Image: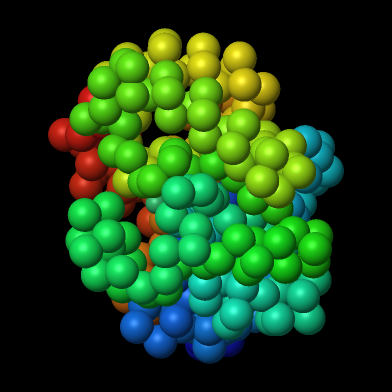
């Protein structure tokens, strides 16, 4: 990325912000590792510090902060991405659907659940991820579109899924992300279930700085497109393109 643009961004960007990034498969078919490395390099030049999701939600320090999250649980997150994250000491979190673990590359499942055409992680992969001090969150049992789910399905999903994930990995689940960014029609029901199951925060795909003032279950998160250029990915990450989201999704207020 052009040095002058980096310098300009450094001047125009606010001195303090906290933002959460959402990515999926890190592979040559989607967002490549080399592009991710280049993105990290630019964000560092912009004086951005990378924090874990729990830390970014709980720290009050001034400065520019970003936390990376990866949705669905693709094997490449561990195989391809993790060595780089370890090297760079970048904390990250994967939002997992426990029933999608160990499912490999299953084209029917991919099309049914609208997943990426990539291998899914195994339980062993996730153990390795946790052993390296990375975090996990919950993303429904098997990538449920909550907007179309009944109250009973939602109740079962949250009650069963969070316990299942916690027991499987001996891990306290604090964070939840909505598949497709879709909220259920009955938001109160879900928010109550999340609270009952001691989930601290839930993350949408509404672009913006972290909205600490909102309900803890509607936290902003910026999805970077799999085919975004480095330039566009950077502008999204730092908030220059937040206005564009509001224009593009003005008609989807019910779902997101
Ligand atoms: Zn997802």
| Position of 88 relative to 245 (above/below) | below
Task: Please indicate whether residue 82 sits to the left or right of residue 178 in the image.
Answer: right
* Quadrant holding the C terminus: top left
Residue 117 position within the rendered picture, expressed as x and y whole percent measured from the top left: 31, 73
| Position of 33 relative to 154 (above/below) | below
Residue 123 quadrant: bottom right
| Position of 86 relative to 35 (above/below) | above
Task: Please indicate whether residue 221 sits to the left or right of residue 213 in the image.
Answer: left
Q: 243 and 130: which one is in front?
A: 130
| Position of 61 relative to 90 (above/below) | above
> Outermost residue toward the left?
251
x 61%, y 42%: residue: 165
Residue 103 position within the rendered picture, expressed as x and y whole percent measured from the top left: 42, 64
Task: Please indicate whether residue 19 sits to the left or right of residue 187 in the image.
Answer: right
Residue 149 position within the rendered picture, expressed as x and y whole percent measured from the top left: 26, 27
x 78%, y 81%: residue: 87
Number of callouts in the render? 0
Q: 42 and 187: which one is in front?
A: 187
Specify whether residue 219 is in view.
no
Q: 102 and 23: which one is in front?
A: 102
Residue 138 quadrant: top right
Specify whether residue 85 is in view.
yes
Rendering colour mode: rainbow
x 71%, y 61%: residue: 127
Residue 253 position within the rendered picture, expressed as x and y whole percent measured from the top left: 25, 28
């Amino acid at each position: 990325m052009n040095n002058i643009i980096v310098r300009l961004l450094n001047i125009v960007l606010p001195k303090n912000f906290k933002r959460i990034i959402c990515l999926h498969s890190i592979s040559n078919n989607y967002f490549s590792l080399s592009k991710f490395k280049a993105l990290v390099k630019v964000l560092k030049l912009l004086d951005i510090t990378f924090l874990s999701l729990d830390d970014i939600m709980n720290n009050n320090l001034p400065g520019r902060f970003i936390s990376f999250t990866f949705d669905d649980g693709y094997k490449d997150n561990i195989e391809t991405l993790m060595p780089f994250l370890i090297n760079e000491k970048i904390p990250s979190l994967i939002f997992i659907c426990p029933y999608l673990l160990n499912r490999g590359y299953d084209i029917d499942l991919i099309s049914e659940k609208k997943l990426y055409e990539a291998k899914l992680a195994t339980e062993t992969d996730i153990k390795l991820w946790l052993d390296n001090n990375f975090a996990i969150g919950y993303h429904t049992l098997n990538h449920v579109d909550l907007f179309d789910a009944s109250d009973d399905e939602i109740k079962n999903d949250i009650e069963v899924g969070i316990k299942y994930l916690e027991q499987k990995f001996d891990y306290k689940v604090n964070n939840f992300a909505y598949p497709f960014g879709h909220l259920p029609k009955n938001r109160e029901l879900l928010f109550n279930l999340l609270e009952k199951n001691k989930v601290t925060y839930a993350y949408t795909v509404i672009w913006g700085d972290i909205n600490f003032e909102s309900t803890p279950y509607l936290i902003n998160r910026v999805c970077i497109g799999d085919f975004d250029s480095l330039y566009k990915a950077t502008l999204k990450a730092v908030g220059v393109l937040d206005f564009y989201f509001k224009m593009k999704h003005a008609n989807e207020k019910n779902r997101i």
